[in-house]
Image (cartoon, rainbow, N blue to C red):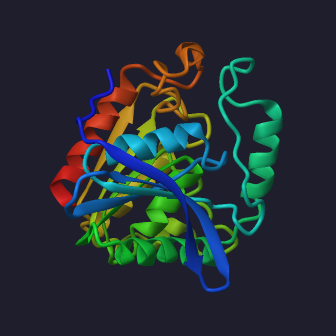
């Protein structure tokens, strides 16, 4: 059961300015008046699809302003790949395109887009000062770890972020080497049967967080990569059979995400 509050929300697509670039983004926010913490949602390689929009809305229903910016704006504006009942997940063509675009992203451009999303949130009158967090999955989990190094980010939920210990999208220094710059609290979520992220890698991340005395928690589940995929199986019944979804891990991880945001935003 997905726990939500009864907060009514409004949703819309917006443009996030970043110099000469306008980044497409999906915005969900409480309909009621007031000021709220804000959360940036970073997607997997499949763009701002229905799953990411659902997650963005679910966060907003907890009483946050939530925004999901497109990470492929320079490469493939408007790209999104959705769950497919035929493939019980994403189609082979979606994987091919998502990976193709993923391989073209550059660290400094992504970092600039993260900063643009933060700046945009700060312009909204219903966003509280000093209360911005991030959440990301797979590719987005790595991006969330990058975002955590910015002083504006008070809470980070990084789900099975790939390549954190080995890469940084074209930069020589892997993202893990920037761990000491993290100022807020970070929760990292991994599956012990993840074929894409080894236990050695997630142990390296935990060791680095400990070394620099970052406020953190690391959660490991008896699950594979993408265990949160299919969290909205009630909405998409075929996801009951999604090979990645883990019915024990996903709801437990979600409760920890709520705890993280409630305590820090």
Residue name at image x 25 percent, y 41 percent: 7
Residue name at image x 74 percent, y 61 percent: 77
In the image, 62 versus 135, the foreground residue is: 62
> From where the camera sits, is residue 172 visible?
no
- Name the spot of residue 2 as percent of width and height, x first: 33, 26
- Number of marks drawn: 0
In the image, 145: left or right of 110? Answer: left
- Name the spot of residue 164 as percent of width and height, x first: 53, 59
Q: Quadrant of the C terminus?
A: bottom left
In the image, 192 versus 2, the foreground residue is: 2
- Name the spot of residue 48 as percent of width and height, x first: 60, 49
The residue lying furthest to the left in this view is 263
Q: Quadrant of the N terminus?
A: top left
In the image, 121 versus 40, the foreground residue is: 121
In the image, 250: left or right of 167? Answer: left
**Image: 226 above or below 122:** above
**Image: 246 above or below 199:** above
- Name the spot of residue 69 as percent of width and height, x first: 55, 60
**Image: 211 above or below 89:** below
The residue lying furthest to the bottom in this view is 19
* Quadrant in which residue 241 is drawn: top right
Residue name at image x 44 percent, y 68 percent: 147
> From where the camera sits, is residue 75 visible?
yes
Residue name at image x 23 percent, y 35 percent: 6
* Quadrant in which residue 25 is drawn: bottom right
């Amino acid at each position: 059961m997905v726990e939500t509050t009864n907060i009514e929300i409004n949703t819309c697509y917006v443009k996030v300015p970043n110099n000469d670039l306008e980044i497409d983004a999906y915005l969900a926010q409480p309909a009621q008046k007031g000021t709220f913490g804000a959360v940036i949602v970073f997607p997997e390689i499949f763009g701002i699809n229905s799953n990411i929009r659902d997650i963005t809305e679910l966060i907003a229903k907890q009483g946050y302003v939530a925004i999901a910016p497109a990470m492929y704006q320079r490469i493939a504006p408007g790209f999104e790949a959705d769950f497919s009942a035929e493939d019980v997940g994403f189609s082979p063509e979606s994987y091919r395109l998502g990976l193709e675009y993923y391989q073209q992203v550059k660290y400094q451009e992504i970092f600039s887009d993260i900063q643009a999303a933060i700046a945009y949130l700060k312009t909204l009158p219903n966003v509280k000062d000093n209360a911005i967090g991030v959440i990301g999955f797979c590719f987005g989990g790595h991006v969330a770890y990058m975002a955590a190094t910015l002083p504006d980010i008070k809470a980070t939920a990084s789900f099975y972020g790939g390549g954190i210990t080995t890469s940084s999208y074209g930069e020589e220094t892997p993202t893990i080497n920037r761990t000491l710059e993290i100022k807020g609290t970070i929760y990292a979520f991994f599956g012990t049967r993840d074929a894409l992220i080894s236990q050695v890698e997630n142990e390296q991340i935990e060791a680095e967080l400990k070394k620099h005395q970052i406020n953190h928690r690391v959660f490991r589940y008896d699950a594979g990569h993408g265990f949160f995929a299919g969290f909205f199986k009630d909405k998409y019944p075929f996801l009951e059979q999604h090979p990645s979804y883990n019915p024990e891990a996903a709801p437990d991880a979600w409760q920890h995400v709520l705890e993280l945001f409630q305590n820090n935003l």
